[in-house]
């Protein structure tokens, strides 16, 4: 884990910036509990952090941001919390969609979206349709998302092709084309806040060579300055993808 040093270090040069950043936004509930507040307060505060991070990514020229908004495992939480999170998602999309659209953000929901409540699915689909042609920043929102299930769904797509008589030669490229993130480069940098040191079923296929950055900062306290420090650390990494350093 890298300790954040929120000094005045500049954003790395464009060629040293990641093209695709992914974030596991962890710590909302614990942030609230530490303050004697309901967990819902932490989730709501977390949406404020997300707005600031999305804005920073757009300003700093990061083309793709993928955020882990709600996992398939999160459905196991108490029904009251699940209902709040679903209502909060719909509320955020309702209140922020116009601003995000004006800022050129393209919203792309990924995951098992059929699991969402009807009214939430409607808002998610509306956001995707409205922003489909935006080019400033692609925001992948992983909702009812699980990395293993994504791979299972991709394999099912290949099996369906084979059953219908379409020639299928299974390889990494073809499987990647069947993932929810088809067309996106794999994430260069995965950030997890909240002090945990695991991927928690997030982008398992795509993270094969991602740089990992773990922060002890709870998501509601994670600011663009913390993101900047993660980018500075990323810029120092030597990414060899299994090769050796060039002399």
Image (spheres, rainbow, N blue to C red):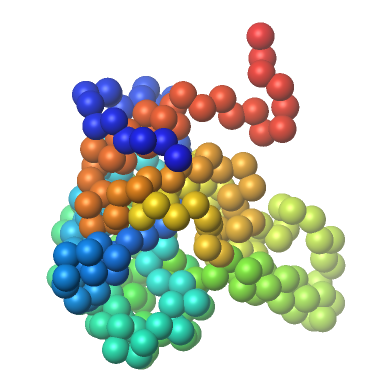
Residue 175, placed above or below residue 1: below
Q: Where is residue 225 in the image (x, y as percent from the top left)?
A: 24, 38
Quadrant of the rendered image containing residue 152: bottom right
Quadrant of the rendered image containing residue 9: top left
Residue 226, placed above or below residue 108: above
Q: Where is residue 174 in the image (x, y as percent from the top left)?
A: 72, 58
Q: Is residue 44 rendered to the left or right of residue 1?
A: left
Q: Which of 138 and 149 is in front in this view?
A: 149
Q: Where is residue 22 in the image (x, y as percent from the top left)?
A: 44, 51
- Can see residue 118? yes
Quadrant of the rendered image containing residue 81: bottom left
Q: Nearer the viewer, residue 196 or 65?
A: 196
Residue sitting at the far top:
247
- Can see residue 133? no
Residue visible at 16% across and 70% down?
Answer: 36
Q: Position of residue 227 (x, y in %)?
A: 31, 41
Q: Which quadrant of the figure contains the N terminus?
A: top left
Q: Is residue 78 rendered to the left or right of residue 165?
A: left
Residue visible at 44% across and 55% down?
Answer: 196
Q: Is residue 85 rendered to the left or right of residue 17?
A: left
Residue visible at 38% across and 45% down?
Answer: 215
């Amino acid at each position: 884990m890298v300790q954040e040093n929120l000094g005045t270090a500049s954003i790395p040069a464009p060629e040293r910036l990641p093209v695709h950043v992914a974030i596991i936004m962890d710590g909302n509930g614990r942030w609230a509990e530490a303050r004697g507040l309901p967990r819902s307060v932490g989730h709501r505060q977390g949406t404020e952090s997300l707005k600031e991070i999305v804005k920073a990514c757009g300003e700093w020229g990061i083309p793709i941001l993928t955020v882990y908004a709600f996992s398939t495992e999160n459905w196991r939480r108490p029904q009251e919390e699940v209902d709040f999170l679903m209502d909060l998602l719909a509320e955020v999309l309702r209140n922020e969609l116009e601003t995000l659209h004006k800022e050129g953000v393209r919203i792309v929901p990924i995951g098992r979206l059929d699991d969402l409540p009807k009214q939430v699915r409607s808002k998610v689909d509306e956001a995707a349709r409205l922003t489909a042609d935006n080019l400033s920043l692609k925001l992948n929102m992983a909702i009812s998302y699980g990395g293993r299930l994504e791979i299972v769904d991709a394999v099912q797509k290949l099996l369906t092709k084979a059953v219908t008589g379409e020639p299928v030669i299974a390889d990494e490229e073809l499987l990647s084309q069947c993932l929810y993130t088809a067309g996106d480069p794999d994430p260069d940098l995965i950030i997890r806040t909240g002090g945990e040191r695991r991927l928690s079923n997030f982008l398992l296929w795509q993270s094969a060579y991602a740089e990992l950055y773990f922060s002890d900062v709870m998501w509601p306290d994670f600011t663009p300055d913390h993101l900047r420090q993660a980018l500075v650390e990323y810029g120092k990494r030597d990414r060899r993808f299994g090769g050796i350093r060039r002399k």
